[in-house]
Image (cartoon, rainbow, N blue to C red):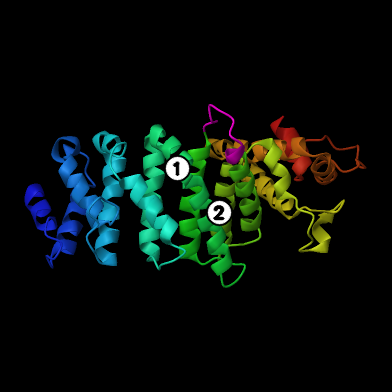
Amino acid sequence: MWNNLFEILKTPTTKIRLQALQVIRILTRDKTYLNETINEEQFEILLDAASIGLQNPESSDDVQTEALKILCNLVFQSPKCQELCLKNTAVEGILKRLRSCKEQYVDSNIKFFDMNLLFLITALTPNVSIKVRYHDGLVYLVETLDLMMKNAKSKEFEQQEIKLINEILKVLFNITVTEPTTVDEDDDQHLQRLAIVLHDLLLYDAKSKELTEGYHSNIVNLLTNIPISCMTELVPSNADDESEMFENFNMHSINIFLNFLALRLDKIFETSMANNYEKLPPILTVMIKCVRCTSTIRRYVRMKILPPLRDVKKRPEEGTTLRNHLCKLL
């Protein structure tokens, strides 16, 4: 049955291609014998159906989306398919389509599953992660985020937009998590540009508190990979809101981090669940980087977390302030 389904896919004009792909997608949910079943030719057929292969026959948006879903399943389930991604055109095809988004319309579902597939490939095959970073992948991904902000109708992203942005942020995390073996001036500039875009993203919200928290969580995770020297880009001198200015610097991003830290600490002391402790290191890492990069941020954070102590009758760990919660953890 598996081979017959791929025979149908070999003819681009076949009307039942979408149905064949839907059946294949169901089959790829089970990883039993998947390594033994899939071969390189079949993987290439799926890449072509998704329009990221060598042939790239014209396919409808539905066919491309379905093929991308299958490829996501295969890369997630099969080590053999992960190895195939080292030598096929999957990454180049995704980056090519990403680069063309400025000039031509690409369906939002295709964009999302492109990023989902790229996330899985870069997470499971580190060598591909390096390849993406040094073949302008970092540049294209940052440009995509910038373009999404320019095209946004308001300062509140729609759910579909947030889903795509989160996938892009996760890909960016994968390709920046490893320090480069050689110092590259261009790479430093790209990371600085990334920090600027992340600051701009923090000016936007999502439709709900839960979506906003997840969105901020991905930004925080990515910032753990950004060098301390780039953290100054998070506190520009322009004033979107005078109330958030401190010593001529905009502290909007720092306020978001402080609120995010408070939210994480509240969850820890409300639930006492171990998995909530695991969510604390990224935001603490980012806060430490911020206070190390400039004395202005250091003074501001000290003012917020360690204000002048007036009540000396209570122990420092008693209470619900940031200071109290941090002292409890100490």
Residue 82 image offset from top left, x and y in percent: 30, 37
- Name the side, left or right, on which 115 lies relative to 258: left
Residue 179 belongs to the span the image colors magenta: yes
Between 172 and 257, the one lying in front of the other is 172
- Res 112 quadrant in image: bottom left
Q: Are marks 1 and 2 in contact (CB under 8 Å)?
A: no
Q: Is mark 2 on a helix, strand or loop?
A: helix
- Name the side, left or right, on which 281 lies relative to 98: right
The residue under label 1 is 135
Q: Over which residues does the magenta segment extend?
A: 178-187
Residue that sits furthest to the right in the current view: 310
Residue at screen point 66% across, 60% down: 203
Q: How far apart are marks 1 and 2 (CA)?
A: 26 Å
Residue at screen point 36% across, 45% down: 91
In this rendering, the answer to whether 188 lies above or below 70 is: above
- Name the side, left or right, on which 292 lies relative to 199: right
Q: Give the main secondary structure, helix, strand or loop, of the magenta stretch.
A: loop
The residue under label 2 is 215
Residue at screen point 83% across, 56% down: 245
Q: Which amino acid does label 1 sit on?
A: His
- In the picture, the quarter occupied by the C terminus is top right
In the image, which disc is placed on residue 147?
none
